[in-house]
Image (cartoon, grey):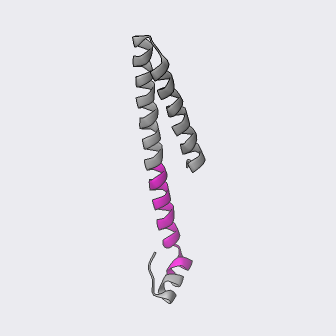
């Protein structure tokens, strides 16, 4: 699972490529940088979705443990 720090590092990397894209004068280089940026953004989005799914699954498994169920019944709340 990726941490918030890793997400931030990916965002910084994308920002650096965007800066390079603005500074470059060669059209081919600009096009290649755009492709790199799009791929990095897609990877970041995928990683975030997987992280959300992982957190969701782990929170569900915690709620399904026998101890959690007993505590849930005792307190009258649900996970």
Q: Measured from the top left, where is residue 8 in percent x and y?
A: 55, 43
Which contiguous range is marked in magenta? 50-69
Q: Is residue 10 above or below residue 58?
A: above
Q: Measured from the top left, where is residue 37 in percent x and y?
A: 44, 29
Residue 47 appears in view: yes
Q: Which secondary structure type mostly characterizes the magenta part of the structure?
A: helix
Locate residue 48 relative to residue 3 in the image: left or right. Answer: left
Query: Nearest the camera: 47 or 28?
Result: 28
Residue sitting at x 46%, y 66%: 60
Q: Is residue 42 above or below residue 5?
A: above
Residue 3 appears in view: no
60 part of magenta stretch: yes
User: Would you identify the image quadrant in which residue 22 lies?
Assistant: top left
Residue sitting at x 41%, y 24%: 34
Q: Measured from the top left, where is residue 17 in percent x and y?
A: 50, 27
Query: Nearest the camera: 67 or 43?
Result: 43
User: Would you identify the image quadrant in which residue 45 lies?
Assistant: top left
40 part of magenta stretch: no
Q: Measured from the top left, where is residue 11 in percent x and y?
A: 52, 39
Residue sitting at x 54%, y 33%: 13
Residue sitting farthest toward the right: 5
């Amino acid at each position: 699972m990726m941490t918030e720090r890793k997400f931030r590092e990916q965002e910084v990397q994308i920002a650096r490529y965007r800066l390079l894209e603005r500074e470059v004068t060669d059209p081919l280089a600009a096009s290649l940088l755009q492709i790199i940026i799009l791929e990095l953004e897609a990877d970041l989005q995928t990683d975030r979705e997987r992280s959300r799914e992982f957190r969701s699954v782990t929170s569900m498994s915690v709620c399904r443990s026998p101890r959690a169920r007993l505590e849930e019944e005792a307190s009258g709340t649900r996970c």
